[in-house]
Amino acid sequence: MPAELVDAFFSVTDSGAKVGFVVQGGQAARFGWAEERMLDHYAPLLGKRWPALPAAFTGGFDAALATPADDPWTMVFRGSQCLRLHPVDGSVGQVGSIDGQYPGLPAAFRAGIDAALPAATAGEAYFFKGGQCVRYDLRSEMPVETMSLADTWQGLSAKAPAFVNGISAAAVNPVTGKAFFFKGSQFVRVALSTRTVETAAAPVDEGSWPGLRRTFSPGRVYVVQRIGESGDPISAAVVDLATRTVTGTLDMPLNVTRSISPTPDGRFLYVATMSGYVCVDAANHQVVATFPRLISYDPANAYSPDGTHYHFTSWQQNGDSSYSNYLETVQVGTFNEVSRIELKATVFAGATTTENSSRAPVVLGGPYRIAPHRDGRFVYISGGGDGPRPDGGRGRSGAEAGPPALPTVRTDRA
């Protein structure tokens, strides 16, 4: 775990929504103030999120200042340098020194800033360096006052004594106007208008800042282990990527494990076994839900872009001994059905796109890929055209007509 969970935290308006950007090391991820959780399930590198950043800034931000007057333009600090960043479209401008941008700051602040925060008074900001804090008038470009953190922020010494010697980041909730100071793995809430610390130092965890730790964590890997003469995969080793050690084993009560699919937020695992499909709590490895129907031997699966729905394939035997394949969509963390769509496609002659109306629709045999559209409304599925037809015959098979076709089915998730 890094020494500081949050290096910088600034908020802007993006398409009418108040969005925060949390920076840790050389990565950044979005936080939704209305949603009160991280919007990203992983944190892209700064250089990937904002390709126009100079190389000196891609290793991390020391601080960032976003004010209502300049929204969404944000001043980003790194060492003695600063620049203006438009975090929504990624453009960069006005690269220069802290001394040139904010004249009159004490020498220690000109060399680098630990944190920055817009003040409750329009046109003013706070800059933090070690145990000192400067209130700065952005319009007249001069400091208004320089005081210790303990004297500036009432209650800080009593409620968070470790914070009086410096903080790593500061942020403002643009919805409520409350501010937050971060240091190490803790935070405090502050009433910005009265400069009063309202809460004692508390841990940054899933209850206080949902998703923040997970978004920046290297995470875990589940390695399916093959044991026995048959070589069947019957369990999975849990590997912590941060320590590169095996921390446990995922032993399923429902026989052989075929595949494991972690949810985007890391809270659940969907495990396909020889006996069926189960949803497992990733924290304690307990089964929380079981799928009541048969699944494909090698089930295709994917998550919706927003991480709230899980798509996978299943099958059932019909009364005439034929088989049908289905696209199942459930709510993440459960098997509560959102939709169930039978997978059928018309096979086209050769590589043309002209439908052969004389040919009966075939069931997609063994879907290979599921790819949700980025807006979440559609799901694209590719599968072999050699699956069983509803009439009991076979679709396009290698014996009949060479390699199986790969029709693509588009289905509405809703």
Image (spheres, helix red, strand yellow):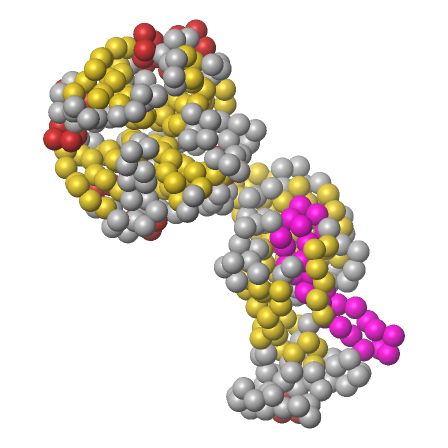
Q: Is residue 322 magenta?
A: yes
Residue 223 rendering spot, x and y as whole percentages: 57, 51
Count of numbered marks: 0
Q: Is residue 286 visible?
A: yes
Q: Position of residue 237 (x, y in %)?
A: 60, 47
- Which residue is rendered at x = 25% and y = 18% of the image? 135
Residue at the (63%, 71%) spot, across then down = 367
At 62% from the left and 53% from the top, the residue drawn is 309
Which of these two is toward me, 392 or 176?
Answer: 176
Q: Which residues are magenta?
A: 309-335
Q: Quadrant of residue 316?
A: bottom right
Q: Is residue 349 above or below residue 362?
A: below
Is 160 magenta? The answer is no
| Percent of width and height locating residue 342 | 72, 70
Q: Is residue 39 left or right of residue 298?
A: left
Residue 110 visible, this angle: no
Q: Quadrant of the C terminus?
A: bottom right
Residue at 15% across / 31% down in the picture? 101
| Main SS, magenta residues | strand
Instruction: Name the residue furthest right.
Output: 319
On the rendered structure, is 338 left or right of 267? right
